[in-house]
Image: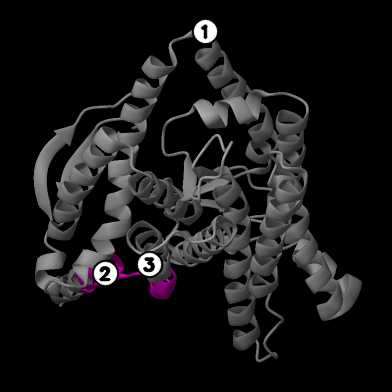
């Protein structure tokens, strides 16, 4: 009987693994993201400001829903309070380092090295986005078959150690397609290829980098609020690096070229999607956790925060674009996005239940983590 029980357990686990491999969160948001890029490339140029708003908001929405399963399974990298406090300092060092590289080394050489690095990462990111979709179009037994190819040695700056080379057929097919797609990006540097890689990075970042509490999210966002203001308004560093960096760390939005225009594209950095996105994703998981707890205790469903917070993101980004157009100068997006999403959180709490609700939300810690714990969840 123990053998039979073990067999049933293994079968159930295999079935669960197959379902995970076929799971596509927020499919309509993904479809709309693809349609936006395809429409702009094949049909007509979409008004850039609307294109930015729609693409960024859909990416945050999709990424938030993608984070639900990995967070529940512990397959994410959680940021601690110490990480959140250090992040603006580390980010400043990295940003200034790139500024120095572009200033004193040949720009083409730096960009070739960065392109190679991001293309390797892009292959893995694209596989993660494409394989669940492909898995839905093949038989379940085929989708769950694991093929082994040996061991991959450590890749500096990319992997922490040797990795087993194994994959499912959908992952293999997605990998071949991703390699071809990245080859197209390297040769042409087409904006569609750039955005596909950028969106894959954004969705993967929001999916697997998590915050465990509202407090950690607030610390991170407030720190980056001042980081963005300093590097955009008080130095030329941020704008110089963004314009010099020829790699998929920003999304490009085509626009009708006007006389005197320096670039045929509007730009949005991936950080303006991923950083607010991981906080928005936290509020979605918080809604689900609080609803499940209330149901288990036989209490009325609590108020939801995700709709208000993602609207706060949309409003903050829209304000960024409006101010940028009025003053015709680059704006630090987090200057407007951070008040938008934090303000939406706390105003929603006050409306829902006053100071008591506000204190409860401020003290929220995601299930499975002790408040103030410094150990991250299991790394992906």
Residue 348 location (% of width, % of height): 79, 73
Q: Say which mark, if any, is on residue 35.
A: 3
Pinpoint residue 235: horizontal percent, then vertical percent. Answer: 73, 24
Direction from residue 251 to residue 192 in the image, left or right: left
Main secondary structure along the magenta-highlighted residues? helix
Q: Provide the secondary structure element on which disc 1 rests.
A: helix
Q: Residue at x 38, y 44 (%)?
A: 194
Q: Which residues are magenta?
A: 12-29
Q: Relative to 134, is 207 on the left or the right? A: right
Tell me which corner region of the image, top left, top right, bottom left or bottom right, holds residue 237: top right
| Res 309 quadrant in image | bottom right
Q: Nearer the viewer's eye, disc 3 or disc 2?
A: 3
Q: Nearer the viewer, residue 70 or 192?
A: 192
The residue nearer to you, when weighing 275 against 167, is 275
Mark 2 neighbour class, 10 Å CA radius: few under 14, some 14 to 19, many 20 or more: many
Q: CA distance from mark 1 to mark 3?
A: 41 Å
Judged from the image, the secondary structure of the residue bearing numbered disc 2 is helix
Who's the residue at 42% across and 69% down the image? 32
- Magenta residue check for 11: no
Question: Label 2, on which residue?
Answer: 22
Q: Is residue 294 left or right of residue 198?
A: right
| 351 or 144: nearer the viewer | 351
Residue bearing the label numbered 1: 104
Disc with the residue nearer the chain's start (1 vs 2): 2
Mark sitting on residue 199: none
Q: Position of residue 70 (x, y in %)?
A: 43, 60
């Amino acid at each position: 009987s123990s053998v039979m029980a073990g067999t049933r357990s293994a079968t159930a686990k295999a079935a669960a693994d197959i379902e995970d491999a076929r799971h596509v969160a927020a499919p309509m948001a993904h479809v709309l993201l693809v349609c936006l890029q395809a429409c702009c490339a094949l049909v007509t140029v979409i008004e850039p400001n609307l294109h930015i708003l729609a693409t960024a908001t859909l990416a945050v929405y999709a990424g938030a829903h993608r984070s639900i399963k990995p967070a529940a399974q512990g397959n994410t990298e959680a940021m601690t309070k110490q990480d959140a406090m250090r992040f603006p300092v580390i980010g400043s060092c990295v940003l200034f380092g790139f500024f120095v590289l572009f200033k004193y080394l040949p720009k083409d050489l730096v960009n070739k090295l960065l392109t190679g690095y991001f293309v390797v990462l892009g292959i893995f990111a694209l596989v993660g986005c494409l394989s669940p979709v492909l898995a839905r179009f093949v038989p379940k037994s085929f989708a769950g078959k694991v093929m082994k190819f040996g061991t991959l040695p450590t890749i500096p700056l990319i992997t922490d150690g040797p990795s087993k080379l194994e994959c499912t057929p959908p992952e293999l097919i997605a990998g071949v397609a991703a390699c071809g797609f990245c080859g197209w990006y390297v040769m042409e540097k087409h904006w569609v290829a750039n955005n596909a890689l950028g969106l894959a990075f954004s969705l993967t970042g929001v999916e697997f980098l998590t915050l465990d509490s509202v407090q950690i999210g607030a610390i991170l966002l407030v720190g980056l609020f001042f980081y963005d203001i300093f590097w955009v308004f008080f130095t030329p560093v941020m704008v110089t690096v963004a314009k010099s960096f020829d790699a998929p760390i920003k999304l490009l939005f085509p626009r009708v070229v006007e006389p005197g225009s320096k670039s045929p594209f509007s730009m949005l950095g991936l950080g303006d999607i991923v950083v607010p996105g991981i906080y928005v994703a936290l509020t979605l998981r918080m809604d689900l956790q609080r609803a499940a707890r209330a149901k288990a205790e036989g209490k009325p469903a609590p108020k939801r925060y995700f709709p208000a917070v993602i609207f706060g993101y949309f409003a903050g980004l829209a304000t960024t674009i409006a101010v940028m157009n009025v003053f015709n100068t680059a704006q630090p997006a987090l200057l407007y996005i951070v008040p938008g999403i934090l303000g939406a959180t706390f105003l929603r709490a006050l409306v829902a239940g006053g100071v008591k609700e506000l204190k409860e939300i401020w003290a929220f810690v995601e299930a499975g983590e002790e408040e103030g714990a410094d150990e991250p969840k299991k790394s992906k």
